[in-house]
Image: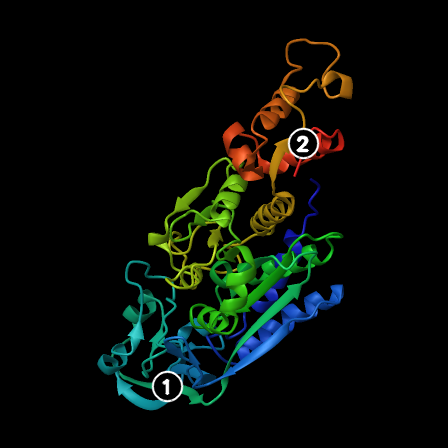
Amino acid sequence: MNINFKGQEMYDLANRIFPKFRSITGNGVRETLNILQEYLAKEDISFKIHEVPTGTKVFDWTIPKEWVIKDAYIEDSKGKKIIDIKNNNLHVMGYSTPIDKWVELDELKEHIFTLPEQPDVIPYVTSYYKERYGFCMSDTLLSSLPNGKYHMVIDSKLIDGSLTYAEVVIPGETDEEIMITSYICHPSMANNECSGPVVLTELIRYVKNIKKRRYTYRFVLNPETIGAITYLSQNLEHLKNHLVAGIVLSCVGDDRAYSIIESRYANTIADKSLKSILNAKKSYTTYSYLNRGSDERQYNAPGIDLPVVGFCRTKYGEFPEYHTSADNMGLISPTGLQGSYETMVLWIECMENNAKYKMQVLGEPQLGKRGLYPTISRKGSSNEVAIMMNLIAYSDGKNDLFDISNIIGVAPYELIPVINKLIENNLIRR
């Protein structure tokens, strides 16, 4: 399959959304969606934007107040700014309440978060559901501060606003659905935040251009956790009736690895299909649901029970730059994004072609009279025939594309042209 190289376009798009001041609510989310919308407009595609008001009950949760942040910094007694969110928006703890106060160094330290084990990075810290304030800086910087007076300033407020999420639904020939989702709630981190939305956006463009779609495709961008819960509270019945398989994209921009986070019992078509695609990689890591951490946990929660898995390059929490300022644009790459995009395109193609296949003749078919068998038998000529015969052997109406792929050890996307050839010759049927 020829997959166009989109890695540089995705990287450039990630670079545009990287500086936006995102949180679980607020204008940073809306500004990010506007940039992604501008990119999709080239294909005449539009997000449907939803605003869910503060105070709305969503299952066991409540939509919080919207956080509005205008400025945050610490300056010394001479007016020199020690940290400033204009330089790095990780310098303020997410959802900090306002403060304007001069303090001594000891009191200042009570409101500073660092990572002593990684002394040169700024940590990412939030306090969504308990009102407090705080700042983040490198441990090296904190250790260098002399005794004296410091001015803490956070110009913020919590207002009755709304939580924002977006979706695109692309109809297919059936009302059975494939869902791909990611999150938009972290500030300037490249792999943990920007990579998922840009790969998802490029996949929207890809699916829109599939000439004959079997499935309806649902793409969702929401704040992590509370956004997924909100989405489920409004769409659960529909998803239970129509969803075939779903994937949560997270940390899909680096070049280091491939990973799957299984569903709760690892027994869904999403588990089987994505593993079948990843089996063709040199190596990948399987994480059980016990190692969950992104929105796959919401889609698999008891009573929700949707067939959804997580897909990463290096899994969140497994790379040292995770949730720090070191997760910058240098951590992701065009080739890393392209690898994730290609994996998802292959998954979509295989899902589109997935079925149980059954032989149309009794016994072993005679391939030669159909031009499917080499007319000269010699060493080395049998590999393609072996794949075809092995596929035939397990086309008994019990195994789907991914089952056969796993049994005979051939990537599912490599079996598709063989299947089509056998269908054309009336040897198997879906």
* Residue 384 relative to residue 111: left or right: right
For residue 97, the mark is 1
Residue occupying image coordinates x 70% and y 28%: 427
User: Is disc 1 placed on a helix, strand or loop?
Assistant: loop
Mark nearer the N terminus (1 vs 2): 1
The image shows residue 421 at horizontal and vertical percentages of 72, 31
Residue at 55 percent of width and 33 percent of height: 404
Badge 2 local density, few (<14 within 10 Å), some, or many (20+)? many
Residue 18 appearing in the image: no
Front one among 89 and 203: 203
Write the residue at 47% across / 68% down. 228
Residue type at tag 2: Ile
Please identify the quarter of the rendering in which residue 125 is found. Answer: bottom left
- Image point (63%, 52%), residue name: 7
Which residue ends up furthest to the left in the rendered image?
106
Give the number of marks: 2
Instruction: State the mark number for residue 428.
Output: 2
Give the distance between the C-alpha atoms of the residues marked 1 and 2, in whole angstroms.
Answer: 65 Å
Which is more toward the observer, 316 or 43? 43
User: In this picture, is 296 found above or below 362?
Assistant: below
| Residue 213 horizontal/vertical position (percent) | 70, 53
